[in-house]
Image (cartoon, coloured by chain):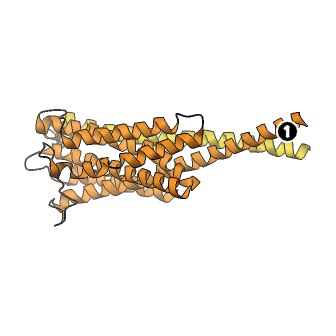
Chain colours: A orange, B yellow
Amino acid sequence: MPWLQRSTLGLIAAGLTLGLFLSPPDYQQGDSVRIMYVHVPAAWMALFCYTAMAGASAAALVWRHALAHVAARATAPIGASFTFIALASGSLWGKPMWGTWWVWDARLTSMLVLFFLYLGYIVLAGAFDDRERAQKSAAVLAIVGFVNVPIIKFSVDWWNTLHQPASVLKIDGPSIDPSMLAPLLLMAIGFATYYFWVLAIRMQDEIMAGKIRALRLRRAESEAGDRSS
Amino acid sequence: MTPFQAFLSMGGYAGYVWPSFAIAALALGALLFASLRSRKATAAELDALETQAGEEASET
């Protein structure tokens, strides 16, 4: 997918240029606000990937479409990486701004739970010798774990915490200056095209691996047939 | 302080800003690299199997 590759690199290069050079420091947070340009897009993509994974898992269980399982499995490590980036960069932002690397508040804890849901999915999807059973159990985990997604989104409204509430996805429009919104959105779209780029690579990989399994199975069956005849 | 040094110091937050960007670059880069490598290996394996299957089919 050369166009996905090109748009990912272009968008992230533009986002970094605006975010690191052309956007102003925050009047309270100074230059530490630039952490936002990786932290917020990564957190958005962490939720986006989980939603995609749970949606694909539900489609796989309901319509039994083989590609749906493939899409969910291919999404999991990408979502886990975005969640890791959000947690790590959040911690690096929390230290200078809040005075602590970590607090067990609702937003941070529910993001950590999201990370463990991804890891649980990856482990479960590879845990059984019976592929069918492994995929089914992992799909059920992904769907049940989806309750965590709205909890993450609304945690900053439901509980009073150190973490600030949303300033972009608000009903009355973003309350962030265009000079900061532009790099934020460029990085977010760049992360989204990265997701689709790597998703395509991983899905092609999974589909070829499926063909290998089918070829091996056919060969094993024909050898067994040769011996019995 | 030169403008470049000022840029690198990130208003005193260099120790927090640069690691954030580095972690993101490393994580996304490593995942991309691993995905490309795995796809290449799988493609090679599939290719070998299909060639083998083709040869066996032409023998019989």
Q: Residues within 10 Å of mark 1 (few under 14, many from 20)?
A: few
**Mark 1, secondary structure of its residue:** helix
What quarter of the picture does the C terminus of chain A occupy? top right
- Image quadrant of residue A224? top right
Who is closer to the viewer here, A168 or A2? A168
Q: Position of residue A4 (x, y in %)?
A: 46, 57
Asked whether, in this view, residue A219 is left or right of residue A1, the answer is right
Taking the spot 15% from the left edge, 60% from the top edge, the residue there is A177
Q: Position of residue A71 (x, y in %)?
A: 50, 51
Q: Amino acid at mark 1?
A: Gly
Q: Is residue A59 visible?
A: yes
- Image quadrant of residue B5? top left
Asked whether, in this view, residue A175 is left or right of residue B54, the answer is left
Taking the spot 36% from the left edge, 45% from the top edge, the residue there is A145
Q: Residue furthest left?
A: A28
Taking the spot 30% from the left edge, 47% from the top edge, the residue there is A148
* Residue annotated with mark 1: A225
